[in-house]
Image (tube, helix red, strand yellow):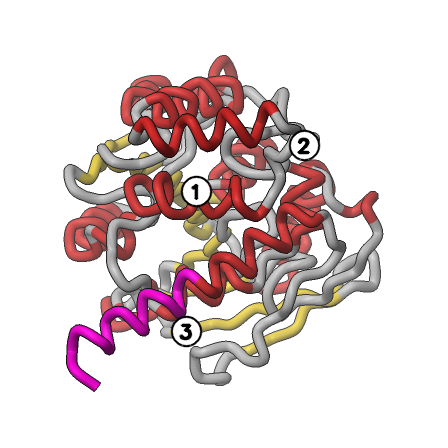
Amino acid sequence: MTPEHKHLASRRRVLELLTVALAYVSSGVSRAVAPKAAALPQDGVRWITLSSGHKVWTQRMGSGPTKVLLLHGGPGFSHDYLQCFADFLPKAGYEVYFYDQLGCGLSDRPTDPTLWTLERYIQEVEEVRTALGLERFVLYGHSWGGILGIEYALRHQAALSAFVLSNMTASITDYLAYTGQLRAALPEAAREALDRLEAAGQASSPEFNQIIERELYTRHVLRLDPWPAAVTRSFASVNAQIYNQMQGANEFVFTGNLKSWDRWKDLPAIRTKTLVMGAENDEMNPADIRREASLLPNAELFLSKKGSHLAMWDDQANYFAAILAFLKKV
């Protein structure tokens, strides 16, 4: 097989995985295909039993006085796309904790719809923190994990030595306004197809979501081709019940229970040392990321010039240089 054929085959495989994930999201099924195993070595794995009786998966990598708990995005995705942290933080002397939220990845996947709420997830993070024995730790939250991180910091600030808020605005209304702008900037043929499908009541269809993947994701979610295997694992294992209930069918159709979330006025109450991260090509408005950094009293700002929503992959060197420089000050 020629290099060109290998590249095309790899790209087709990514599209297949994303198509499966998006089909699960749009179909409203209660459970997506779970990954068979974590790609990381299994040393440091610990299962934590929550007060509900359900178990969540965690894994410690590295050791050191500064401990970092990672909150992945979604809602309903897995920790897999954050596995690149294992290549940077442990060897720099930081103790990193990967964690699949309930219903996600390797953790238990109950189908009880009462579990998929912001308040219950905030409680879950505190239970995980307590079980792991983390005191004065660094909390990292990406995308949906950033919502969780903001909420946790507002309630449990005393437990934090620092906070990394990555690629998340402070308002769903502002998020939707910006994704609307991004949609308007898509090629005309893509816009017309999305409009046609919406008018036909097919905004949750696989065809609608495939257009989003092809036109939006490649511009604003991850600007690499092909996508890394760790990222495709997260997309392929999405729990559609959680995603649909808390967000909606896709980036443009937000009908879930997070729809009214807004914390702009509360950000000044978070006095924890914070690194706010974003990217010029993100699906989060870079102006919102700058605004967050201006409102948080002890914040630093990193804005990737070439990266997108997953800047830990498509601007990896600069992204982790910013995190490591920040952690040295904690």
Contact (Cβ within 8 Å) of mark 1 with mark 3: no
The x and y percentages for residue 223 are 25, 50
The quadrant of the picture occupied by the N terminus is bottom left
The type of residue carrying mark 1 is Ile
- What residue is pinned by disc 3? 61
Measure the C-alpha gap from mark 1 to mark 2. Answer: 21 Å
The type of residue carrying mark 2 is Gly
Earlier residue among tags 2 and 3: 3
Q: Nearer the viewer, residue 1 or 221?
A: 1
The x and y percentages for residue 231 are 40, 62
Q: Which mark is residue 256?
A: 2
- What residue is pinned by disc 1? 211
Which residue does the image show at 45% across and 78% down from the upper left? Answer: 39
Q: Which SS class for mark 2? A: loop
Q: Is residue 12 magenta?
A: yes
Q: Nearer the viewer, residue 87 or 244?
A: 244
- Judge depth for marks 1 and 2 and give the one in front: 1
The x and y percentages for residue 91 are 25, 72
Earlier residue among tags 1 and 3: 3
Q: Which SS class for mark 3? A: strand
Q: Is residue 248 magenta?
A: no
Q: Is residue 187 visible?
A: yes
The type of residue carrying mark 3 is Met
Magenta range: 1-15
Q: Is residue 324 visible?
A: no
